[in-house]
Image: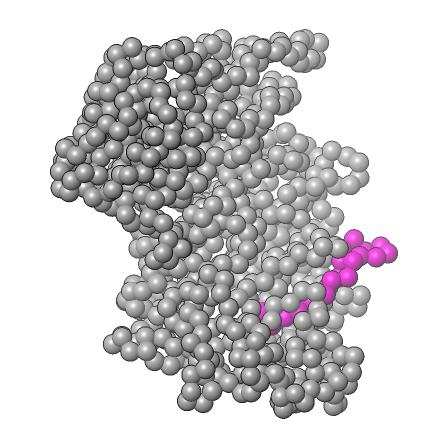
Amino acid sequence: MRQLLLKTGGALLAALITCGTGTVAQAGEADRATILILDASGSMWGRLADDKTGPGGKTKIEVARDVLDGFLGSRDMSVPLGIIAYGHNRRGDCSDIEQIAPVGRHETRALSARLARLNPRGKTPLGQSLRRAAADIPRTAEEADIVLVTDGLETCDVDPCAVAAELAAEGVRIRAHVVGFGLTETEAAALACIPDKTGGLLMRPQSGAELAEALSRATAEAPPVAMTGLRLIFSYPGAMPDTYEWALRDESTGQELVLGKVSGAARYQPFAVELAPGTYTAIVTAEAGRGEARFTATGAARDIVVTMQGLLPVTAMRDRGPYAARGETVAIDLNITQAGQETGGAALALRLYASDGGEAITYSTVEGKAGVSQAGINLPATPGPYLLKLESWGGEPVEEMTIQTETDPAVTLLAPPAVAPGAAIPVGSTGSQLWNDGIEIWQGDRQVDWGVTLGDLANGNSLTAPAEPGTYDLVYKTTDAAGTRVEKARLPIMVGTVADDATGAAAAPGAAAACDDGRGHGPDACANGREAGTRAWTDYPHRCLPGDRTAPYCEMRDAATGLGFILPENRVAEVVPASGTDIFPRAAFIDATGATASIFLNPETPPPGDNACHITRVGRLCADPDRGDEKLAAAIRTLQFTLTTGQVIRRCGDTACAFDHPNPPISGRLPARWSVEAARPTGDGGPQLSTWFFDLDRSGAFHLVGLNQPGGTDCREAGPGNRLCAFTPGIASQDFDLIRRTLGTGGTRGDTDGNTGGDTGGGASDAARTLELLAPSRTPAR
């Protein structure tokens, strides 16, 4: 226990804060027991839904064996443990439930060997297994944890919900936890009654690492029943952060006190606090998430549950349709430009909906790490438009796009005109996109290379050019409705030669001239014959060339200037640091095909015309306004929305959403589809912060609102000393008012009543969210 004295005006507030999580049971104690129920039914021979290791990968029972071996070797052996397994001796027998180890202290190696011999084959008697586990609890135990690890639902007609109610009525305090290994959200929800009735946890691990974490979480020592003072309890439906930090804010003074960081086994335990009477806010922060809960301390014992809201990633999806409507899996291009709180192998859900909404038709899991990837999802055999949404497991929208499916879609191949012998070919395509579609290499009527499938490309494999120079064809093959392999597209490619960018003519193999380096050339290349010293497109520091798997959403970050942007396909870029009186860098975005005008950021001489330049968060983006080119307009929209020297901390989907960032502190609510950057000091020595709020609506119109930024129009006060201004026309008044009304900076809070003042996003009020924070979470954790 340590004592803190906080000075508030002329008074002293004494806060006695205890940082502890209880003690582990000693070897001689028998007042607590833990019983593990292991699913060894036949379905454990299946693989997890997001398993990418192919037919040779591990089954769920093999993963569980490995995890249990590590769990038994690392747990505190002084805590009594019993193990029950079901479904491993006989098929179709609901009584196939066996005590593997009675409650007690066991030698790890022998117990692991016994579990390794379990051979799944039978049914899933969840209710009867729970009753058996309760019967194995020692008479001396005053409380017990039953940890049910299952990959399926009850198959033996004993209602596990009714059994959970029986457990709750026992004289012994029994907490029953459900670890749904590989369960879907719907299946996990069907078992939520078990922890709901007993005060246990509901978790839904989708990988071996998440299973190990779930076991540690479920078997951590339970908090004692008798409480002194207050206990802060961390809640989050996703994977437990490695470290998080507790803090308290005294609402009477606004002062915040950091209580300490929590890591290791302590992450699963309450954080004990004794406070003088008053109103406080408990704050929990992790690397990519934050949560708050306001409460009143009256001297009575009480639990304060604080649910962390993990930051969502910033992503882009590319439409490579029309996709094949075959009832088969297609490959969807994804680019996570900024990771959120969840980065595991099943951090996000890619869900498919009918074009007019409704319940999800199907879904697949997506890894949350930053970078380019492809996800597979099964499309219906009925052609037409569908809506793809990338969402968190809690249903928060991250990104979406409408796709078109056809029974027999046309296919286009994308690849450079020439590559070096034996080099990887940066190949891409549009149309069909079935996971098992292939891109092969032919020479006339002779197949030279079996090539790769789109699934191979999605898993990081590449298509390699032949070692022999010559002219070849890339051939896109798919399977038609009759099951016949058919050709859908063919594209010639030179191996060992390069096409002249000015004339389009191809040099003969081995006859490269002085400026022919096999890479294609920039705007200063070989316009009047071949000249040495010209610059290749690939010499530009930032590029998104044809065939790149990231195209047209290649994420860029210039190290020298900090300028970030998404570069459209077929463009290269060069960034020049600010100099003299400039406050922003300059950049040139050049079309590598020469078909459209170049785009310039903060040019020294802007082009004439009222529509030549567009406002961005880092200055003016300019291009020739007379081209009337939709491709050019699309590139400008992409750059206008993504150009930044900051960090995007929140991006809303189709509904309004809250944001709260700790350093520097800024919080509030965003309208649907709006985003916000991390705040920065204004640089004038004052306490004010500056940031940007921005939106790209469905019509393609860009909207920009600045906090304490120079310039702007329709400026209004947003709290003491804060100035919020519009920087683009056409901003909806209710969107502007929602940002202004709810904005809080430097520890201040705006009016967060989300039900007035034009909040049309469907979000609950902050008061309602605070009440939710005070209730224990029952959201299935992964």
The residue at the point 67 percent across, 71 percent down is 538
Task: Name the image quarter holding residue 512.
Answer: bottom right
Provide the residue span drawn in magenta: 569-587
In the image shown, does 277 or 24 lie closer to the viewer? 24
Magenta span includes 320: no
| Rendered image coloring scheme | one colour
In the image shown, does 312 or 253 lie closer to the viewer? 312
Q: Position of residue 588 (x, y in %)?
A: 72, 67
> Do we see residue 755 in this rendering?
no
The residue at the point 28 percent across, 26 percent down is 101
Asked if 12 appears above or below 594 in the picture, the reply is: above
Number of marks drawn: 0
Q: Position of residue 752 (x, y in %)?
A: 53, 33
Asked if 321 appears above or below 236 in the picture, the reply is: below
In the image shown, does 736 or 767 lie closer to the viewer? 767
On screen, residue 81 versus residue 94, left or right, reads right
The residue at the point 75 percent across, 85 percent down is 514
The residue at the point 33 percent across, 35 percent down is 113
Q: Position of residue 356 (x, y in %)?
A: 34, 58
Magenta span includes 582: yes
On screen, residue 91 versus residue 782, left or right, reads left
Location of the C terminus by quadrant is top left
Location of the N terminus by quadrant is top right
On screen, residue 7 versus residue 335, left or right, reads right
